[in-house]
Structure formats: structure tokens, C-alpha cells
Image (tube, rainbow, N blue to C red):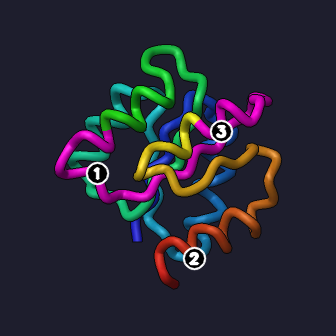
Amino acid sequence: MKILIIDDNMEFRIMISDYFSELGFEVLEAEDGKTGLEMAKKVEPDIIFLDVMMPDIGGIEVLRELGADDDTRKVPVFIITGSYFESKMNQLFMQESNCKEFLSKTAELAVIQKKVEAVLGK
């Protein structure tokens, strides 16, 4: 199973990568939205972790581009953000059909793991 992390925060990418690699996942990383979109098409991940605030293309634009592309439209996306957003922001992302979760980066990794397993049917 492949996870693609699209996040400009290197520490977060390393933490997620280490955790899920130990569980047997293949974890790929992109440090910005443009690279993440290109990688999503090439590597065909089973799930994508996506940050909201990134320097080049924001998370909502990446999410919508993934949803508009035939190759990536069915890939479940977890929005995992370090920023606090009001519930309207959560609702904006959750309206997109490929967005399955909207989580804080402070969520316990075991909780994220259970949600990943539920979405992937493991």
C-alpha cells in the first residue's frame, strides 16, 4: 500500500513516513502541491495526506485538481493541517468527494492509522 504525503513541513513528513513505513506502507513525499500533483499521477498512491497551507498551491486547489483528474479522482485524501480553522473551512474541504478526513497534525498517529485502515479496508 502506498501513501503520498504532500506537505511543506519536513518534520511532519518524516514523522508520518517513519510511522507508516514501520507498518509496511510504502511512503512517498512531496514538499509542495505542484510536485504532489505530479507524483500522484505517476505513483498511483492508495491514499494521500495533504496539508492545507503550502507555499505554491494551497491544499484546496490540490484537492480539487486531484478530484478533477481521471487518474487520481478515486484516491482518498486526508487533509492533515497544523493550522486551526473554523468549521466552515472543514466543510469546504469535506464537500470534495475525494476528501475523506480533516484532521489536526496533533492527532495521535494511532488514530490516523485507524482511519487509514478503515478507508483502505484493512
Question: Whole-Å distance between the Cαs marked 3 and 1?
Answer: 20 Å
Displayed quadrant of residue 66: top left
The three-letter code of the residue at mark 1 reads Arg
Residue 75 drawn at (x, y percent): 36, 57
Label 2: element kind: helix
Query: What range is drawn magenta here?
Result: 66-91
Nearer the camera: disc 2 or disc 3: 3
Nearer the camera: disc 3 or disc 1: 3
The three-letter code of the residue at mark 2 reads Ala
**Tags 2 and 3 in contact by the CB under 8 Å rule?**
no
Query: Residue at coordinates 60% horizontally, 23% vertically from top-left?
Result: 53
Ranked by sequence position, the earlier of labels 2 and 3 is 3
Magenta stretch encompasses residue 9: no
Residue 11 drawn at (x, y percent): 69, 38
Instruction: Name the residue tied to disc 2.
Output: 118
Q: Is 87 located above or below residue 44 in the figure?
A: above
Mark on residue 90? 3
Magenta stretch encompasses residue 76: yes
Query: Residue at coordinates 34% horizontally, 30% vertically from top-left?
Result: 35
Label 1: element kind: loop
Mark on residue 73? 1
Question: Whole-Å distance between the Cαs marked 2 and 3?
Answer: 20 Å
Displayed quadrant of residue 91: top right
| Residue 50 placement, left or right of 68 | right
The quarter of the rendered structure image containing the N terminus is bottom left
